[in-house]
Amino acid sequence: MSVAWTLPTPVGVREVENDWITAPDGVRLAVQLWMPETDAPCPVVLEAIPYRKRDSTRGYSRFWGRRLAQHGVAYARLDCRGSGDSGGLLVDEYLPVEQEDNAAAIAWLAAQPWCNGAVGMRGVSWGGFATLQAAALQPPALKAIMSFCASDRRYTDDAHYVGGSFALTGLKWATSFKLVMAGPPDPAIFGPDWERAWMDRLEAAPPIAAQWLAHQREDDFWRQGSVGFAPERIACPTYLVGGWADPYNETIPRLLQSLSVPSKALIGPWGHGYPAPASPGPGLAWEHEEAAWWRHWLAGEDTGIMQGPRVLAYLPEQAPAQADGGSIPGRWIAAPDWPPATEPLTLRLSHEGLGQEAGKGVVEIGGEVVGLQTPEWCPFSGPQYAQEQSPDDARALVFDIGPLEAALEILGTPVVRLHIAADRPVAKLAARLCEVDADGRSWLVTYGVLNLTHRASHAQPDRLTPGVFYDVALPLYVTARRLAAGARLRLALSEGLWPLLWPSPEPVRLSIDLALSTLTLPVRRSDAREPTFPIPLVEVPPGRSDIEMRRANAGGRASFREVAPASRAVIRDTETTVERSGPDVEAEMRADDPTSCRWRVRQGVGYARGDWDCALEAEVEITASATAFQVRERLVARRRGAEVFCREHASAIPRELM
């Protein structure tokens, strides 16, 4: 920032536990408010998510509500319809009715006597999606947005499908989301009809995993709510925030290149969450940046927020797993725009590894289960980050270069281009880019996966002709990394990553023509800018997660177990106890028979305060033949320990080149 701006002197904060907003169809929406204790009207920022403002996210909402309000920006936390204490039913993600609700909430907030008529919207993950979608509707009072860890393209860059293949993360999310859709309202807010509303939610909760698996292509189901197909509809200033340990970053380069409104982006080292608190670190004193953004665009104050670099990014020197939950060494860099100042470095694949000379002949991949070191698409804690990759490298086709004579800085999207054939009509390709240190340990830099039947289109996949070679370009996830001098760079190729992705229906052998296969790296130019970083840093001490991971891959059988510890939290000011179990994940498969694959996820939650004692358990299991998925989903509800609801859905869904 070129303008010397400091946070205003904090003021008192007034909290409103609940107020009601009436949706266009008459449904009551529950909102919690934090407002600065000032005489003058103030702007307000809305966050709309389905994760229960009164209990599950109460601490989070209060943290941001108080911090924004004390700096002159009110904060409104809305429960999406059918969740928490709002009326109505929640039966899927990001439905048009939810988007209309958020537009109505923006209008309601702008009309309040304490508001100056200017509304912003913010949110992480679901809240970030909702923020982008609200901006695309262009409600008149929405003057600026800030979206964290969200996507503008639901099929390619959300939790369900990865590279055109169904993801284990999608099954975990289906189990979690079932508990969100079926959770009980709090009678202290909702009123005496809470139990009837709870039963309505239980009855309405759909077999959501089967619902998502019924749409295996990028059809209208996924295009709805994907603002990247019409980014010109976003007409207000936009701040995009992400973290290198989070795959939702793919949205940031796309929108930076397509938005015509004032925009900024910041990508730190952290995972799927806010820059404060952040993991891995370093984190940022983020309230300073938010207050500057909102007061600039919602209150007309010259905070200098738009006078610095358009893009700020952290350049890590390690993988998240190496930091052990603490801060990753590195430095902040800047770019005036996207793509940043880089030069392409193209390396050719050969029997000797990666280099300047093209290889000769054809090499083959297949027969091994690869991927147990990278089981989670969207990691939230240390055990879920991609671990040391050597066990998977040993089962993959590997190409190395190095040791590097000097440090190499990568910033952008590496691309693998292969002349490739498969011996089956449905096959996958996975590419991992790794840094191999002096001790021979292999650490993930980035990766990419592709269902090869989706090589030309996610909307219109096309089966492979066995034995025919195709030219395939596989962009890896956008990344930043400073590779140390003396390290080696490794490209590891495999047919799939398991259990990250559901396997192909038959065992597959891939053939790669070395003469026509390359890896292109975006190498940061040595004359690129080094910024004076405007946001105070917050170091993150090493943390510890009790998630337990068990991996086995021997004798032609692979298995994976993830066990999350049970938790119990007491919310003192409401005297509410929240208990959670899971998600607990089980996955197993034989290498010679992909139809032996089985995934199962279980999760539970309970809410209790006096006579209000409700518990939910959800379980989803998926198996498949070569032609169809079988999905079993179970939901159980209990009150004071007695079962009040139990339903199981069994679905058979044809595989569509999946």
Image: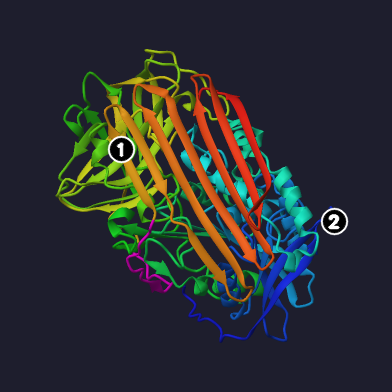
Vertical order, 521 against 514 (above or below)? below
Is residue 542 on the magenta stretch? yes
Picture residue at 83% right of the left edge, 55% below the top = 24
Q: What's drawn in magenta, residue-wise?
A: 530-546
**Could you tell me the amino acid type at mark 2?**
Gly
Q: Residue furthest front?
A: 642
Q: Determine if residue 20 is in view.
A: yes
Report which residue position mark 1 lands on.
552
What secondary structure is the magenta-colored segment mainly? loop
Numbered disc 1: secondary structure = strand
* Residue 629: x %, y % from top left: 54, 26
Q: Position of residue 190 (x, y in %)?
A: 76, 63
Q: Which mark is residue 26?
A: 2
Instruction: Examine the rendering and report whether any part of residue 369 can be seen.
Output: no
Q: Nearer the viewer, mark 1 or mark 2?
A: 1
Above or below, comparing residue 613 to residue 252 in the picture: below
In-front residue for pair 228/386? 386
Going 56% across and 76% down the picture, which residue do you hit?
67
In which quadrant of the rendered view does residue 49 lie?
Answer: bottom right
Q: Nearer the viewer, residue 104 or 593?
A: 593
